[in-house]
Amino acid sequence: MGGRAMSFSNPELLALTPLVLLILALGLTSQAARHRKLAEAFGGAEAARRLTSRDLYGFPRVRLWCLLAAGAALGLAAAGPRLGLGAALDASQPVDMVIAVDLSYSMSATDVEGGRLARAKEVVHAIADVMENERLALTVFADWPYSVLPMSDDPDLIRFFTESLTTDLVELERDQGTALSAVITHARATLDARSRPEAQKVILIISDGEGHEEEGAVLDSVAASAADGVMVWTAGIGTTGGSELIAVGPDSVTMLGEDGEPVVTRLNEDLLRRVAAAGGGGYRNVTGGGGLRGLLGSLRRESLEDTGGSEPVGAALWLVLFALPLLLWEGKLDADGVVELPRHVEAEE
């Protein structure tokens, strides 16, 4: 269920890293020994100091650390490291997932291009595209959850019913905010109604995280789901800056709170993260394209070797970029200390 922190495309090359470090250390040690021999040929430390500004008796520790760090970075880069970005589904098991879309009034906010709900629809469509071989159900919720589509293996049905979602589907008098505990309980019942013993059971909540419930009640329902073998994932839509809410009607009027100030709705990422952590799943902010790709990579049931699991990032380039300055610096240190031998010493050698 959990994603791997790091994987390697060529793990067998990891064994070469200690060998590379050993060769570099031996090479530098050999060079230091040669410099000491040269100092003795000059007539000792005192004479060597008069002939060159370099300390031929000292060991080049800074150069050694530069070479070891650069060698380790290049050795790891050769192994093709990939960094996982959190939890991921088990590639060996099929998936039964309930997608729960928040239709509370706050999802009509326009701090996201096209509106939060429009973005939520795009997310559901993208999930249907990459999970077309899995079973999906569609649920909507505000103060209360409603089933739109029971568990189905037809992604076209998911897309069809998603298109019809609007915040008007929930009666305004029932829209008292986002009730996460209720939708989690409802989604568990949906999963149990057509359960497959071999399948991973997943609830994905797409929401801005704004709710009126006590956080303890929400986390209790999540913990109960996790104890029952149901993972809870969350996808956040919105911005922390938020957006003023506009009242429904012929005239666009800003909604005012009890204090007479405009009502501003904001993405509550902290709650969504805690819900996902308690539910054994992962959280992604899917407002932008990067977060959506991360979510799809985490939910896609393909092997880590083929897709890198939860949209892993190839770290080899960063390791090479880390190693190159170290190598350049080490080369400069070596060049700054080049020993110019007197001709008679060169002739003796």
Image (cartoon, helix red, strand yellow):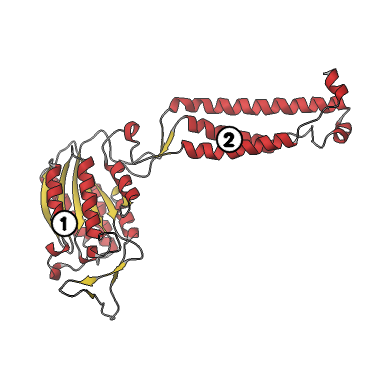
Instruction: Look at mark 1 in the image and give the residue it sits on.
Output: 140
Residue 60 appears anywhere in the view: no
Q: Residues within 10 Å of mark 2 (few under 14, many from 20)?
A: many
Compare marks 1 and 2 and give the one earlier in the sequence.
2
CA separation, marks 1 and 2?
Answer: 53 Å
Identify the residue at horizontal 14%, vertical 64% (top origin).
168
Give whichever of 131, 249 is nearer the camera.
249
Identify the residue at horizontal 57%, vertical 32% (top origin).
71
- Residue 70 is tagged as 2
| Image location (x, y in percent) of residue 212 | 24, 67
Tell me the quarter of the image containing the C terminus: top right
Q: Is 3 situated left or right of 158 in this image?
A: right
Q: Quadrant of residue 62?
A: top right
Vertical position of residue 157 compared to residue 269: above or below: above
SS of the residue under disc 2: helix
| Image location (x, y in percent) of residue 198 | 18, 36
Amino acid carrying label 1: it is: Val
Q: Residues within 10 Å of mark 1 (few under 14, many from 20)?
A: many
Amino acid carrying label 2: it is: Ala
Residue 166 appears anywhere in the view: yes
Q: Quadrant of residue 91?
A: top left
Vertical position of residue 197 compared to residue 21: above or below: below
